[in-house]
Amino acid sequence: MILILDPDAAENSQEYQQLLSHLAAMPGIQSRVHVERGSEQTVTEIYLIGNTKALDIADMQSLPCVERVVRVSEEYRILGRHKDDQRPTYFEYNGVRFGQDTLHVFAGLCAVDNREHVETMLKSLKDSGQVCTRMGAYKPRTSPYAFQGHGKLCLPYVFELAGKYGIKVIAMEITHESHMDEINEALHLTGDPTGVMLQIGTRNTQNFELLKIVGRQTRMPVLLKRGFGITLDESLNAAEYLASEGNRNVVFCLRGMKTNMGDPHRNFVDFAHVPAVKRLTRMPVCVDPSHSVGSRAASSDGIMDMMHVTAQGVLAGANMVLVDFHPEPVKALVDGPQALLLKELPYFMEDVQIAREAYLKRIELRQRQK
Ligand code: PEP
Ligand code: MN
């Protein structure tokens, strides 16, 4: 059960203290307070855990400071959608809004290789009016002998250049908690020129200790990739781990499932799950066409499979696209064969826009049918 408090309920007020002592005295019920400070107002929610079935909604609603009460199902308590649940489906980070109604493209390098490529990439993004990107510094690789990413060594120039080209959010995978500290330190040393969305890769979707530590910080939002060999429910529970520790600014990313049933694609594209995730949870949903399809192969119509699946995801309401680009794919140290070329960026953006407009028209059509 969630108690949503009046927006003006002050922590030091008598009513608020009364509410807390009332809850503390309830046998078999534990409470956890979550405060979300937005630009316009502060939302305080109290999660009641334990035998809440016996509690009466009207009784709880009559407690001091309580504005609304939501009875949640067992599943995805914080990030899930529940009956009569009108909690927001968006968050803001570094001036960018991420919601189930917005769309952002995160085009960029799968792995940072050198300063020159980072700069060329970011300049192209600025020229296309983009404020988000992807930049891999810590790369989980199949072979221990493969390039593992430049790690903290590349962070200062990546952040500095991001600031120079007006990038507000960089999606960056971390594979260990120490990477979070390295990112924070580099952001601080460069004067916080940009923001970072911490990416948890598909190989770490169920690394519960990593999820807990990342979830305990609320400075940076998190992009959680679906696990490539587990059910959707298991991946959504992984997202809930982040939220249960305190960070509910989570974007869920579909990136294909590992099975040879998906051949000739690198993974079995799962973008039909975009609407399912938006129905089951309040998270914005991202699609990653690069790691799903894994090649530049094109259909008989001349359009690359990667662009077809991107359009399919966007047409189904995706809120974010994570996609590999590279100025010189033959020189890329990771995933060169699936990278799009910089000259294809305006084309890619226009193709995404066509799908987005079609999606918005479909919503309009649905509204007219009601
Ligand atoms: C990536 O986005 O660079 C990546 C490694 O993705 P995934 O975790 O989905 O394989
Ligand atoms: Mn990759």
Image (cartoon, rainbow, N blue to C red):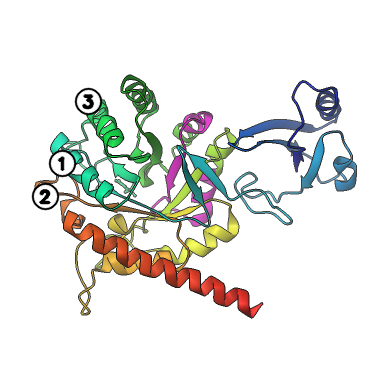
> Is residue 137 among what the camera can see?
no
- Cα separation between marks 1 and 3: 15 Å
Identity of the amino acid at label 1? His
Counting residues from the start of the chain, the first of labels 1 and 3 encountered is: 1
Q: Nearest the camera: 364 or 53?
A: 364
Secondary structure state at the residue bearing disc 1: helix
* Mark nearer the N terminus (2 vs 1): 1
Q: Position of residue 333 (x, y in %)?
A: 15, 43
Q: Which residue is mark 3?
A: 153
Q: Which residue is mark 2?
A: 328
Residue found at x 32% / y 59%: 289
Q: Nearer the viewer, mark 1 or mark 3?
A: 1
Q: Residue furthest left?
A: 330
- Give the magenta part as a residue range: 212-239
**In the visual, does 149 lie left or right of 232?**
left
Q: Are marks 2 and 1 in contact (CB under 8 Å)?
A: yes
Residue 339 relative to residue 291: left or right:
left
